[in-house]
Amino acid sequence: MKKSARVTLTVVAAVGCAARAQQAPNPCEPANFNEKACQVAVKGHGYCSGGAWVPQHYQKYPYYYGFSQAYAAAGGIVTSAPVETCRRAGHLLGRRGGFGKTGTGVAGHAGS
């Protein structure tokens, strides 16, 4: 491997690690549990991290509440995730079809 390729890979890896370090934690994880933020995340199927929407598949809310309580009871330290707001990417797409007007038109004529 050439020296320039190694340097590029090293820089890319460092940027990736820095981006991951800045990502807000999932508010439903036991160590980061935040009751209000987790309820919003479960209802909205994701959470905000650094102003960006992170889609996530969740189980029903009581699962996460019980899991966090068990984690804390076992001596786990909970550092509550902050509540963030951001614009959901899904809101930028059309309601049907997922591709704006084209998707809506196609979805509207799918049964014809």
Image: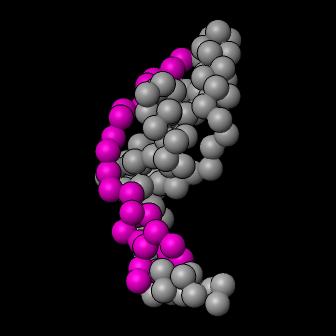
What secondary structure is the stretch in magenta mostly built from?
A: loop
State the extent of the magenta-drawn residues as a range: 77-101
Q: How is the image coloured?
A: one colour
Location of residue 25 in the rendering, given as x and y in whole percent from the top left corner: 47, 40
Residue 9, compared with residue 44, is above or below; it is below
Location of residue 41 in the rendering, given as x and y in whole percent from the top left corner: 49, 41
Return the residue found at the far front. Answer: 112
Q: Is residue 53 left or right of residue 66?
A: left
Residue 108 highlighted magenta (yes or no): no
Q: Nearer the viewer, residue 55 or 93?
A: 93
Residue drawn at 50 percent across, 33 percent down: 38
In which quadrant of the rendered view does residue 65 lie? Answer: top right
Q: Nearer the viewer, residue 12 or 96?
A: 96
Location of residue 78 in the rendering, given as x and y in whole percent from the top left corner: 51, 20
Whether residue 15 is visible, yes or no, is: no
Figure quadrant of the N terminus = bottom right
Figure quadrant of the C terminus = bottom right
Residue 81, compared with residue 77, is above or below; it is below
Location of residue 82 in the rendering, given as x and y in whole percent from the top left corner: 36, 32
In which quadrant of the rendered view does residue 81 lie? Answer: top left
Residue 1, compared with residue 92, is above or below; it is below
Whether residue 38 is visible, yes or no, is: yes
Residue drawn at 49 percent across, 47 percent down: 44
Q: Nearer the viewer, residue 4 or 72?
A: 72
Q: Nearer the viewer, residue 74 or 17?
A: 74
Q: How many marks?
A: 0
Residue drawn at 40 percent across, 48 percent down: 48
Q: Is residue 110 left or right of residue 79?
A: right
In which quadrant of the rendered view does residue 30 lie? Answer: top right
Residue 2, compared with residue 93, is above or below; it is below
Residue drawn at 48 percent across, 86 percent down: 105
